[in-house]
Amino acid sequence: MPKAFPLTCPRRLAAAAALGLALILAAQSAGKAQTVVVFVNGEPITALDVAQRMKLIEVSTRKPAERQEALDELIDEKLKVQVGKKYGLEIPDKDVDNSFSTMARRMNQTAKQFTDALTKEGISVAALKRRIKADITWSSIIRGKFPSINAVGDKDIQDAHKSDGKETAASYLYTLREILFIVPRGSPPTAFEARRREAEGLRHRFENCQEGVPFARQLTDVAVRDEIHRSSAEIGAAQREVLDATAVGHLTPPETNQEGIDMFAVCARDSATGGDTLGMAQAREAMVAERYTARAKKYLEELRREAIIEPGH
C-alpha cells in the first residue's frame, strides 16, 4: 500500500497556498467589479458598469475612452430611465430587441452575429440594451413633454431652406405595397430569423409588382397591404435613402417590427411636381432636430441639478 503523504507535505502546503491565493484574488476582483462608484438618486453605478461603458465607447468611436466620459454617460442614462418611470413610461423589451436588431442589420449582421461580435470585444449585450432602452425612453419623454419642438411654421422652413444655399435632392412620388411576413406575438428570436430568410427568398424572386404582389398573397401567413402613395416630403431621410436605393419593381430590405418581418415593394417612383417639397422637408427635419437637441440638453441639465449624486461607499 502506498504511503500517504503527511498533512505537512511541502507539495500539499504549496498547492493549498496557491489555491488560497487564487481564491483571494478572485474574490478581490469580483469585489472590485461590484464596487459602487456613485449613487444616482439612490441607484448604484458600479466599477464594472464604468468599465463596460468605456469598452462600448471605444468600439463605437474607435478611440480611447475617458473614465469620466463613461461615468457621465451612465449618470445621464440613469436619469433618463428614472424620469421615464416618473411618467409611467415603460419601454417593452421587444422594442429594445428590435432596435438592437436594426443596429445589427446596419452592420450587415444578424442579431446573433452582432451579439457574438460584442461578446468577443468584451462588451456586455445587456449593458448595450440598457443604453438603447434609455435612449428610446428619453426620445419619448422629450417629444411628449415638449410638443412645441415639432411646431415649425411654413415661413420659418422657407426662410431656412432659402438661406442654407444647398442644392437639394429631387422630389419623388412613390407608389408602395407593404408586404408583411407575420410572426405571432411572443415568438422567440429564431422565429423572426426563419421568417427573415423567407422574406429574403421572396425579395430575390420579386421582379415587378404585377406578378410579385399576387405571388406574395399566396404565401402562408403573409399580409399584402393596399397600395399607398407617399411623397418625398412625407418620408424620413433614412427611409427615403432605402426607397431610392431600391429599383422600381423590387422590394426593400426586410425590417423587423412588432408584427413580424416587413418589406415594401416600390411599384413606381415618379418625379414630384409643385415645388421643391423634399428641400422643404429636409429643412423641417433639420429645424426639428436642432430644437430637439437643445431642449433635451436643457432638460437633462435640469435633472442633473435636481438629482442627488453621491460617491459610492
Image (tube, rainbow, N blue to C red):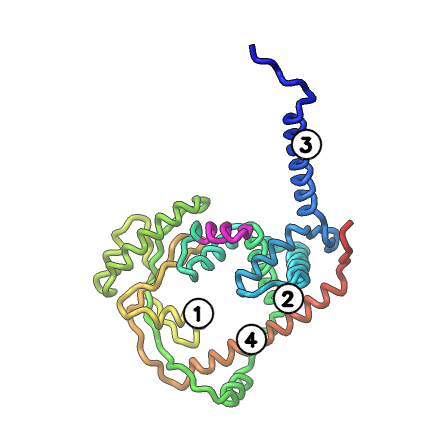
- Per the image, the residue denoted by label 4 is 288
Q: Name the residue located 66 percent from the left edge and 47 percent from the top edge.
A: 33
Which of the labelled discs sits on residue 72, or is there none? none
Q: Visible in this render: residue 162? A: yes
Which of the labelled discs sits on residue 145, or is there none? 2
Stretch in magenta: 114-125
- Per the image, the residue denoted by label 3 is 17
Indicate the amino acid at tag 1.
Ala
Name the chief secondary structure element in magenta. helix
Q: Name the residue located 29 percent from the left edge and 59 percent from the top edge.
A: 203
Residue 32: % across, % down: 69, 46
**Mark 4 or mark 1, which has the lower sequence index?**
1
Q: CA distance from mark 3 to mark 4?
A: 65 Å
From the viewer's perspective, is 59 left or right of 176? right
Q: Which residue occupies the foreground of this view, 308 or 292?
A: 308
Residue 157: % across, % down: 52, 83
Q: Nearer the viewer, mark 1 or mark 2?
A: 1
Please tell me how crowded label 2 is: few (under 14), some (14-19), or many (20+) other residues with Cα within 10 Å: few
- Per the image, the residue denoted by label 1 is 238
**Mark 3 or mark 1, which has the lower sequence index?**
3
Residue 25: % across, % down: 67, 40
Q: Nearer the viewer, mark 2 or mark 3?
A: 3
Q: Are marks 3 and 1 in contact (CB under 8 Å)?
A: no
